[in-house]
Amino acid sequence: MSRYLLRRLLISVPVLLGISIVLFSILALAPGDPFGELALNPNIPPEVRFNLRKQFGLDDPLVVRYVRWLAAMLHGDWGYSFVSRLPVQQLILQRLPTTLFVLGSAYVLALLIALPVGILSAMKPYSFFDQVATTFAFVGYSLPTFFTGLLFILVFSIYLGWLPFIYSSTIEARGLAWVIEHLRQGAMPITVLGLFEAASLTRFVRSAMLEVIHQDYITTARAKGLTEYFTILKHALRNALIPVVTVVALQIPTIFTGAVITEQIFRVPGIGSLLIAAIESTDTPVVMAVTFVYATLVILFNLLADLIYGLLDPRITYG
Amino acid sequence: MRESDKTMAAVRMAPYGATGLAATRSQSLWRHFWRRFCRHHLALLGMTVLMVLTLSTLLGPMVYHHRINDIDFAVSLQGPSLAHPLGTDDLGQDLLARVLYGGRVSMAVGLVAMLIAILIGTALGATAGYCGGWVDHVLMRLTDLFIALPPLPLLLLVVYLFRDTMRRLFNPELGIFLLIVLVIGGLRWMQPARLVRAAFLSLKEQEFVEAAVALGTPPLRMVLRHILPNALSPVIVAASLGVGAAILAESSLSFLGLGFPPDMPTWGRLLFDAKDHLDSAPHWALSPGTMIFLVVLSINYVGDGLRDALDARKVL
Amino acid sequence: MSLDEAALREWVHRVVHGMADRRAFLRYMMGLGLSGPFLSHLLASSTPAQAQTPQPRADFAPTKRGGGGKVRLLWWQAPTILNTHLASGTKDLDASRVVYEPLAAFDSDANFVPVLAADIPSLDNGGLAQDGRAVTWKLKKDVVWHDGKPFTANDVIFTWEFAADPATGSTTTGSYADIDHIDKLDEHTVKVVFKEPTALWYDAFFGHRGHILPKHLFVQYKGQEARNAPYNLKPVGTGPYKIVEFKPGDVALYEINTQYHVPNRPFFDTVELKGGGDATSAARAVLQTGEFDFAWNMQVEHQVLSGLERGGKGKVLITTGSGIEHIQVNFTDPWTEVEGERSSLKKPHPFQTDPLIRQAYALAVDRRTVAEQLYGAGGQPSSNFLVAPSRFVSPNTAWEFDPKKAAALLDQAGWKRGSDGVRVKDGQRLKLVYQTSVNPVRQKTQAIVKKTFEDIGIAVELKAVNAGVYFSSDPGNPDTYSHFYTDIQMYNTGPGSPDPQAHMDKFTSWQIAQKANNWSGRNIPRWSHPEYDRLWKQAATELDPVKRATLYIAMNDLVIEHNVVVPVTWRHGVSAANTKLRGMDLTTWDSNLWRLAYWYREA
C-alpha cells in the first residue's frame, strides 16, 4: 500500500504538469481580452490598447508564455493580476477565509442532512418519510441555485426582514456580536448551497444503502440479534460508503473554487466570484493560479478516495 | 394438492409465465424484466408522465393556437386564465405555448446530454475498473484532467472553434443542438466514470466473478453481462440527477450567449427570465420549474424501477 | 422654421449688444430644445460680460464637518483599481473619485463647477486665450494631500505628463494628447498650451478624466512602472475621504478627511463602496430592504423598478443621458470571406446597400413600445445619433413607425413574398442575423424588433454574445462588435464628454474597422461619404461654438438621412437612492460621486 501511495504521489507531478499545460493553452486560446472595456471609449487611441497587450506579453508565442509562468511558479511567484496588479496569492488569501466558511459549512450541512435522511429512507423505502424526502430532494435539485437563492432572499430578507442579503466581508463587531453577524449573513448562502448539495447526496446515500441492506450478511447480522442501529452503522454503512466517498471526494475540491452563482446572488466575496470575474476579464494569472490549486486538490482528493476504498473494502487491492 | 406442493408449483411456473410454456431464453429474460418493472408502480407512473410530457411537447405546438412570440403588452404578466392557461410573461407572450415549444429542446438536451455522459463515463469507468494496472492509472489521470478543467473558458473556446463548422455541416438548429449536447455531456462523464470504476473495483473481487473466470468467460462478456448490471445502481442515480443538471446547464450556456439563440424559450431560459419577477408574477416561474421537477422526478422513479428490475435478488 | 448660421450669429450679436430682447431669444432657443446653461455659454462667449461661475445648489448648510455616520454605496460591478488614469471601467472611476479630485467638474446641466481650481477660466477673466491655444488655471490655495503635503501646480503638470506618456498606457491619454506643454506661472497658477487652437479646452483636468495625482508619490512610477504603483490600491488624494481598506473586486472602505479644503464638509464619516452581483438585486437592496443607500446604473426593466419603488424606502433617479441605443446596418457582406476576413470593404452587402431596404428597417422598429415598455422613464424614442448636449441635437430629423409603409418599400425594391412568408429576390432570401450583447432588456428589444420584421417578410435570426466577449478588442475573436460578422447589430454609445468630436469620428472613412487595423477602427458600419469626411475635418478646427454646433448637426443629419443606423432609444441614467439621501445632483457627464462631499441624509 505504501508503495502504491508513493508511486501515485510521484506520478502526480508529471500529471499536474500536463494539466497545467492543457489549462494554460485553453486560457491562451480562448477568446477574450483583459483590456476589452477600453474598446468602448472613443478617447483611447488604439495604440494604447496594443501597448498594454505588449507590456503584459499577451502577444508572445504560447510556449514562451507557458515557460515564463512555470518558471515563476517554481519560485513561488504566482504572478500578478492583470486587472488590479495585486499579487495573486494575496487575492486568493483575502478570499480564502470567506470561501472556507461559507462553502465549507454548506458542505458539512449537506453531509449532516444527507447521511441520516438517506439512511432512514433506505431503511424504509417508499414509506411516507421516504416519499416526502424524495420529493423535497427533487424540488431542491430541479431548481437552479439562482432560483432558490432568490426565493430565500424574497422570503427572509424582503418579506420577513430577518436577514441581510448582501454579504459583507468587513464586519466591525467584536466577540459574540461578530459571530452572530457572521452567522446571520451566512445563513442564507450556506443553507441554499447546503440544501442543493444535500439533495443529490441524499439520493446517492439512499441508493447505496438500498444496495447493501438486502445483502445476506445484513440478514445474518440481524439474525444474530444485533440491534438495528448497530447493524446499520457497523455493517451496512461501511460498504455503502464507497459511492458516497466517490461523490464527496469529487466535490470537496469544488469548495475551493466556490459556487459561482450563489456567490453572485449574495455577493459573497469568495474564490468563485474571483474566478468568474477573472475569466470574464481574461485575467489569466488569476485563473491559472486558482485552477491550478483546484487541480492539485482534485488529484489529492481522488488519491485519498482511492485509499479510502481500500480501507472500506478490504478485498480491493491495487496491483 | 398440499400447500407446499402448490407453492412449489407456483415457484416452478413463475419464470415462464401463466402459459407454463418455456419460451426462448432471451425473450423470456426481457419479458421477465419488463414484468418486474411493471410491478414497480412508481416506475410505471414515472414512465407515463415522461411519455405524456414528451408527446405534449412534440405535438402540442402543432395543435395549440397561440404562437410563442405573440407580443402583446396589454396582457403582460397576467396569471393563468381561460385565454392563457399558464398566464403570460412580461412581453405578453403565452406561457403554455412557450413551455411546450421549449420543452422539446430542453427534454432533448437533457436526455441526450445525459446519455452521452453516461455512455462515455460507463465505458471508461468499466475499462479502468476491470483492467486495473496502468490502464486504470492512465484513464483516471485523464479523468482528473477533465475534472480540473475550468468549464467556462473551455466552453467559450469550444463554441468559438466549432460553432461555424457545426452550422455548416448540419443545418443551424441541429448544429447548435449537437454542439450543446456534446459540450454538456462531454463535461459530465467524470462522475459516472468514477462511480462505475469504484463499483468495479469491489465487484471484481467477488466470488461470482471468480466463478465466471473459471468458466472461461471472455472479458467483454464478463463486464457487460456479469459485472455491469450490478454496478449500475449509483450510475442510475447519477443519470436521473444528470438530466436535471443538463437542462439547467443549457440555461447557463444561454446567459453566456453560448447556447441557443435568446428567443428559444427553453425551460432554463424561462426560469432565468422569470427570476426578477418572482414577487410580482410567480406564475411565470412556476411553469418551467414544475416541468423540470416532473421530468427529473419521473426519470428518478423510472431509474428506481430499472434498478429494482435488474437486481436479481430483489423480490418484486 | 430652421435657423441658418448667419441669421443665428446676427441674432446673438444683437442680443449681446442690447439691440434685441434677450428673453425672447432665450424663449425661442429653448423652444428649439437648447438648454438654458448652454445658451448662457453661447452668449457669454460672445460677450464682454461677467464670466459665469454657477454656485453650488442651495442645500442645507452644515455647521461642522462629519457627524453623518456611514453611507453605503452599491455598484454591481466591483472596482479593481483606484486610479482613474488606469481605470478599465466606470466602477473604477467612481471608486477613485471618492479620494481624488479634478480641477473642475460637470454638473447635471453640463455647467463647469470648480473643484481644485479657484474659478473657471473664461474669455473674460483672461483664463481662456482668444486664439484658443491656451488656458490659464488658478489653483485653489491651502489644499493638502491626505499625507499632509501641499497641493501645487507641480501636481497638475505631473498629471499631464503621466497621462500623456504613451508608455503609461493610460486610458485617459486621449484627453491629454493635444497639450503641447504646460507653463508653471507660480505655485498655484498654470498655463496649459495646446498644440493647435481648439474649442475643446474643457476635457483635460475635467471630470472623471481629470483626477490630479500627487507628484511626490507617483514620480517613481511613471511610464511602464505606472501599473505597479502601490498607490493604485492605496491612493493618496485631496478628496473628502481617505482610503482605509480596499479589497479589489469586492469592497472599498473610506473615512473622512479632516483636512478637507471645503469647510464643514463632508457630511458622512465613512463610506462603504461594495461591488458585485447584478443590477436587480442591487435595486432591491436600496429600494426594498434599505440595506444600502445608493445604487448605480440600474439596468433593470422599468416594470420591475417601479414595482420595487412602491415600498417607499427608496426612489429611482433619472439623469438625462447622452447615450443612444441604436441598430447598425452593415454595408459589407458578413457572410463571404475575402482574404481572411469577413465584412470586408471589398465585398459590399448583397442588399443592405439599397437605401430602400434601410429605410424599411427604420420604419419597422417600434421605438415607442421599446421605450415605454422596456425603459420607462429611463429612455425615450429618438431619431438622432447625437443626442446630447442639447445644443448639438438636430431638430431636423423625425422617426416614424409604419410597418405598412416599410412593406411597400420592400415591394418597391423588388422583394416579393415567398411561400413561407419570407421575401425573395433573384433567389436570395431576405434573412438577417441580428446580434447584441447578453442583457435582458436588449433581448426583449430584439424580440420586439424581430416580430415586426417578420410580419413584413424579413426573416430574423437572433444572436446574443457574452458582453465580455462582445466588447473586447481581441483581433482573433469573430464575435466582437467591431468585427460585425452579422447583418445588423445593436448597442449603446455616446459622447464621453460634452463635446462630440471624438464621438462623431465614428463615421469617417479613415476609421473603418478592418483586418488591416486589427478591427480597431471606430467606423463599424463601414459606411463612408465624402461630405461627412469634409464636415468632420472642418469641425475639428472650428473654434466658434455656433458654427461647430451647426456642423455636428449637419453630420448627424447625413447619417440619419442615409439610414446608416436606426436610433432606437435615448438612454438616460437610472440610479436608486434612499428617500432621505440628498445632494447628489447626478449628471451624465461626470461620475455619480462628483458631489460626494456635499451629500447628506435628511433627518
Image (cartoon, rainbow, N blue to C red):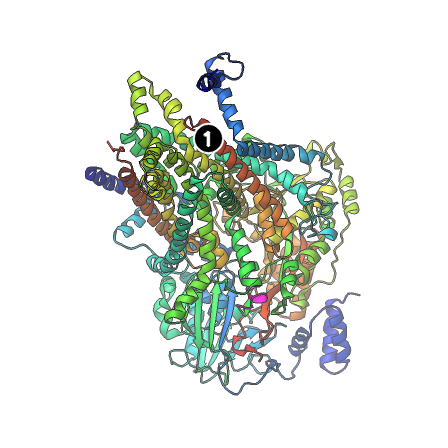
Give the structural element (helix, strand or loop) at label 1. helix
| Pick the front one: C41 or B299 | B299
x and y percentages locating residue A3 in the rendered image: 19, 38
Residue count near mark 1 (Cα–Cα under 10 Å), binned few <14, some 14–19, many ≥20? many
Q: Is residue C263 above or below residue B174?
A: below
| Pick the front one: A192 or C333 | A192
Q: Residue at x 40, y 81 (%)?
A: C150
Judge left or right: residue A265 versus residue B222: right
Residue C9 sits inside the magenta stretch: no
Q: Is residue B247 above or below residue C438?
A: above
Image quadrant for the N terminus of chain C?
bottom right
Residue A300, quarter of the rendered image = top left
x and y percentages locating residue B314 in the rendered image: 43, 29
Residue C9 visible in rendering? yes
Q: In the current view of this chain or complex, which residue is farthest to the front?
A: B2
Image quadrant for the C terminus of chain C?
bottom right
**What residue is disc 1 on?**
B308
| Pick the front one: A233 or B66 | A233
| Pick the front one: C310 or C366 | C310
Residue span colored magenta: C283-291
Three-letter code, disc 1: Asp
Judge left or right: residue A318 versus residue C162: left
